[in-house]
Image (cartoon, rainbow, N blue to C red):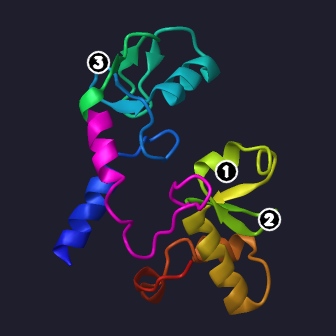
Amino acid sequence: MAARSQVKDFQEAVFCSICLASFNDPVILKCGHNFCRSCITQYCKDSKTSPPYSCPQCREPFREGEFQPNRDLRNVVEIAKKFPEPRGKKACEKHEELLKLFCEVDQTPICVVCRESRSHKDHAVLPLDEAAVDYQVIFAFGTHPSPDTLEQSEQPSENYKTSNVI
């Protein structure tokens, strides 16, 4: 059991905090935080401020182009991809990424790559754990959740925490 937890921790350590997927061409900022090169570049382009930009994790200032490739992390990501997924987590059959989002239009779990694809680009999506809470409320009350109901169900019950819903 402890080994499974360690594998899960190891796999989660190789995820970009911007796209929530495993690192793709990881780069490291001077502050020590890592991101996918494309994610941090897009973050700079989308920023409403002029350089220097703030690290998305610690707000330390940096300039575009100051980040360096993190080859060691890239190698670790490749090793992590060889481990089986933790039980209860499913991967997208098309992109082999974890299903972390829920498309409300198609009523299906999707990965972050699917989210950017043409088939889901303009669809409303939720983090999968939020959708699980919403649908738990729908099943319990037979109706879509009201803001009051959602607020009350924000903290999952003990049964929900230990079950493998979705």
Q: What residue did someone put label 1 on?
A: 114
Secondary structure mostly seen in magenta is loop
The percent position of residue 12, horizontal first and vertical second, equals 35, 54
Query: How far from the left and from the top, in percent, is residue 9?
Result: 27, 58
Q: Where in the figure is residue 40, as x and y percent of width and height?
A: 49, 25
Instruction: Judge by depth and name the residue closer to the eye, 118 or 31.
Output: 118
Q: Are marks 3 and 2 in contact (CB under 8 Å)?
A: no
Q: Amino acid at mark 1?
A: Cys
Q: Are marks 2 and 1 in contact (CB under 8 Å)?
A: no
Where residue 43 sits, quadrant-wise, is top right
- The residue carrying mark 3 is 30
The CA distance from mark 3 to mark 2 is 41 Å
Q: Residues within 10 Å of mark 3 (few under 14, many from 20)?
A: some
Q: Is residue 66 at all visible to an observer of this figure? A: yes
First of labels 3, 2 by sequence position: 3
Q: Earlier in the sequence, mark 3 or mark 1?
A: 3
Q: Is residue 135 above or below residue 141?
A: above
Question: Which residue lies under the disc numbered 2?
Answer: 106
> The magenta stretch spans which residues?
73-99
The answer to whether residue 48 shows anywhere in this view is no
Callout 2, which amino acid? Asp
Residue at 53% x, 21% y: name it.
41
Who's the residue at 28% across and 48% down the image? 79
Would you say 119 lies left or right of 75 here? Answer: right
Hey, which quadrant is residue 50 in on the image?
top right
